[in-house]
Amino acid sequence: MDPVQLKDKIYWVGAVDWDMRYFHGPTFSTHRGTTYNSYLIVDEKIALVDTVYPPFAGEMLKRIKKVIDPSRIDCIIINHVEIDHSGALPEVMKLAPGAKIYCSPRAREGLRKHFQGEWDYRVVKTGDELPLGRRTLSFIEAPMLHWPDSMFTYVKEEALLMPNDAFGQHLASAFRFDDQVDNKMIMEEAARYYANILYPFSGLVLKKLEELAALGIPISMIAPSHGIIWRKNPGQIIEAYRRWASGDWLPKAVVVYDTMWGSTAAMARAIVEGLASEGVDARLFKVSLRDINGIITELLEARLLVVGSPTINRSYLSALSPFLDDLAGLKPVNRLGAAFGSYGWSRGAVKDIEAKLEAAGLTLAGEGLEIAWVPDAGELESCRQWGRALARKIKEK
Ligand code: FEO
């Protein structure tokens, strides 16, 4: 794939990783692969904005060489230290040893620890500018979006925002722009990315969106460090981030459970029937069969999360632990929760699930529902009624 021009003499020179299936270790299943977007700005000075994951350094350098000799790179902007973006920096520095590295103070600390390279660092803060000739780069710090070192780079004359991880998607594609790829797929991946990476920082996302609006800068294109570049409608992803970070919701419920011998599964199905009978879009997930990242993504729209497990060893099934642990870290915004489950000679699962839901910041929508051994017809009707009562809670503003 050749370099792809975004604007006059501004090129995508990154790499497409079709095979990446897990990101951040095993925590994020990237079922559609990913890209590492790196951008080359050719002006009186030549700037490279971010690099790529180390195994793709050669691929990136080949693309750069199709535009310029890499030794001509004057400036390297490192918006974020994480290795998928800074990992090829040592290879670039071998070819352009005189290049100056522009980054936030925390990024300089991180780069020194990662690479032990005593390079020519130029620490920048919000409002600092780097004139390249016809174009000027302006920097906007974005701490905790999603690391302390993160920052955005803005090409003023082109109204081009390069926000690194923000607004990205883990999506491998032969195309680079939003008008070339199915919009539903891009938004699905952008939502999955937000829910599984940026959710805990939603308050900061809102503040950053307000800051960008207050700066009054026009944005004609958003070029993130992963996935598709937003050139047709950059406002679409900004508005989606506002919605997700605000905790806006639809009358939707996510029911997540696991089961030993089918009692909790029967309860789960009856609860879904009760929710649906009140017009709630209820979705059922047996956690051991489903992709946890996908379930978390459903919470971007759902008002209510219902979690069920039978009691075993006085608590919930270990199959639920990865989901509940993920939830505790991601802290969905403005969500209700409830717990249910079957038990035999002792209880414990519902109480422990409720504690986990509250630790993740959810508000309990009502008392948990517990049924001994196997639910009979009357008890299944109680499950439906419990679901209907939860549905009414969803509708309370
Ligand atoms: Fe895409 Fe935070 O690295």
Image (cartoon, rainbow, N blue to C red):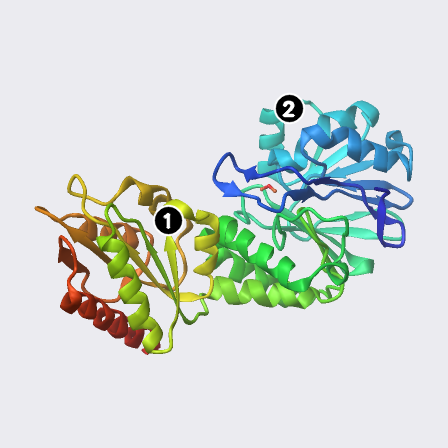
Give yes or no for contact between labels 2 and 1 (Cβ–Cβ under 8 Å).
no
Please, is residue 229 above or below residue 273 in the view?
above
Residue 300 shown left or right of residue 324 in the figure: right
Which disc number belongs to residue 105? Answer: none
Residue 163 shown left or right of residue 304 in the figure: right
Circle nearer the N terminus (2, 1): 2
| Real-space Cα separation, disc 2 to disc 1, in angstroms | 40 Å
* Residue that mark 2 sits on: 115
What amino acid type should be assigned to the residue bearing mark 2? Phe
Residue 113 shown left or right of residue 63 in the figure: left
What amino acid type should be assigned to the residue bearing mark 1? Val
Q: Does the image show residue 342?
A: yes
The image quadrant of residue 34 is top right
- Given residues 177 and 231, the one toward you in this image is 177
Point 86% across, 41% down: residue:
46
Find numbered disc 1 in the image and state the secondary structure of the residue it sits on: helix
* Residue that mark 1 sits on: 287
- Given residues 364 and 144, the one toward you in this image is 364
Point 31% across, 73% down: residue:
391
- Given residues 159 and 33, the one toward you in this image is 33
Number of other residues with Cα within 10 Å of mark 1, as a class: few under 14, some 14 to 19, many 20 or more: many
Please, is residue 123 above or below residue 295 in the view?
above
Point 25% across, 52% down: residue:
262
Number of other residues with Cα within 10 Å of mark 2, as a class: few under 14, some 14 to 19, many 20 or more: few
Residue, far front: 377
Please, is residue 62 above or below residue 208 in the view?
above
The image quadrant of residue 239 is bottom right
Q: Quadrant of ligand 1?
A: top right
Of circles 2 and 1, the one toward us is 1
The image quadrant of residue 31 is top right
